[in-house]
Image (spheres, rainbow, N blue to C red):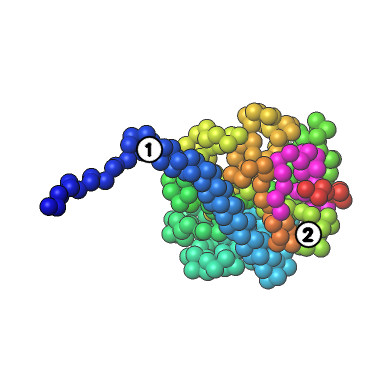
Amino acid sequence: MTVSRPARTPRGFTLIELLVVIAIIAVLIGLLLPAVQKVREAAARTKCQNNMKQIGLALNSFHGTYNVFPPGGTSSTTSGTSQSHLKRVGMTVFTVKHSWTVFVLPYLEQGNVQKQYSLNVAWDNAANRPAIANRIPAFQCPNVPGGDDRVCLTSSGAVKVPPTDYAPNYGYADSLVEKGLCDAVPDPGGSGIMDVNRTYSIPEIRDGTSNTFILSETAGRPNAWTLNAMTGTGTRTDGGWANPGNAYVTHGFDATGTVSEGGTCHTNCTNGNEVYSFHQGGAHHVMADGSVRFVKASVDIRLFARFITRAGNEVVPND
């Protein structure tokens, strides 16, 4: 006689076993997330660097056409010297303001935007607003929080313009010389390459094109950032890519990033018209030869300022 046995019920996970599995998964996630984040940051940093290389190539292509680099911006001027500089790049109206960016649009595959834009009227004139409303991918660093949602207003609040995270750093403040922090050179505030209402050629860059900044990161606008903390939302009004006020000079801040003029902090202190990036330890800069160089924030401000001058005859660091 055959005795039937009841089917055995498979044993399930005990609570302890389930908790062990969950703990193992949590540990694995904890190990993987930092690695994934590092990969993302590295990719974004590479993309930022490539954007700047693209702009550096555009600036040098512009120089190949006009035999000078574009001005850092234009402002209304009656100066014969300034007008002669602006005539070099094809300007005929000298009572209007424009950004350096509009000169390089054709070299960034933005010819359609350039065709919409007129140098004969002010940058924020109604005729130019369709053009300046365009977002230019090469002008934005992917590391910056907010990404494509960022829009800069003019001081009047009337015009919305997508931002640029890169701008000319065309000099340094007299106060840095007065306090003995930087070398005394003629006109420190205009000692760089892309000054307002000025155009310079490669032969005029006597410090060497590979040793001289032509463009630097000043990222995060319109939001205000100080020492990696956002201190204001939408308060920076000069960060629009077409805004003629987005070029700047280095002032030097104190260690808190709040007191300007004559401090030793030159990078990642504040994005209020200073060098600022969302990369750890320093910022990218486009050199006049089109190459991109990462300069550490720890570099002494005197040595940092030597990268800015076009004809200071100083020795620059290898950092």
Residue 209: mark in rendering: 2
Most foreground residue, 99 or 78:
99
Q: Which residue is mark 1?
A: 17
Sequence-first disc among 1 and 2: 1
Q: Secondary structure at mark 2?
A: helix
Work out which residue is located at the far bottom of the displayed protein and give it: 65
Q: Secondary structure at mark 1?
A: helix
Residue 29's spot in the image, x, y percent? 47, 43
Residue name at image x 48 percent, y 49 percent: 147
Pick the residue in front: 100 or 37: 37
Does the rendering let one see residue 295? yes
Q: Quadrant of residue 186?
A: top right
Query: Bounds of the magenta span?
Result: 293-311
Locate residue 144 relative to residue 251 in the image: left or right.
left
Residue that appears at 32% across and 40% down: 13
Structural crowding at the residue carrying mark 1, measured as other residues with C-alpha within 10 Å and reported as few (<14), some (14–19) or many (≥20): few
Residue lying farthest left?
A: 1
Q: Position of residue 275 (x, y in %)?
A: 65, 43
Q: Amino acid at mark 1?
A: Glu
Examine the rendered structure and indicate whether residue 112 appears above or below residue 162. below
Q: Position of residue 284 (x, y in %)?
A: 66, 50
Viewer-side label of 1, 2: 1
Q: Residue at x 82, y 58 (%)?
A: 208
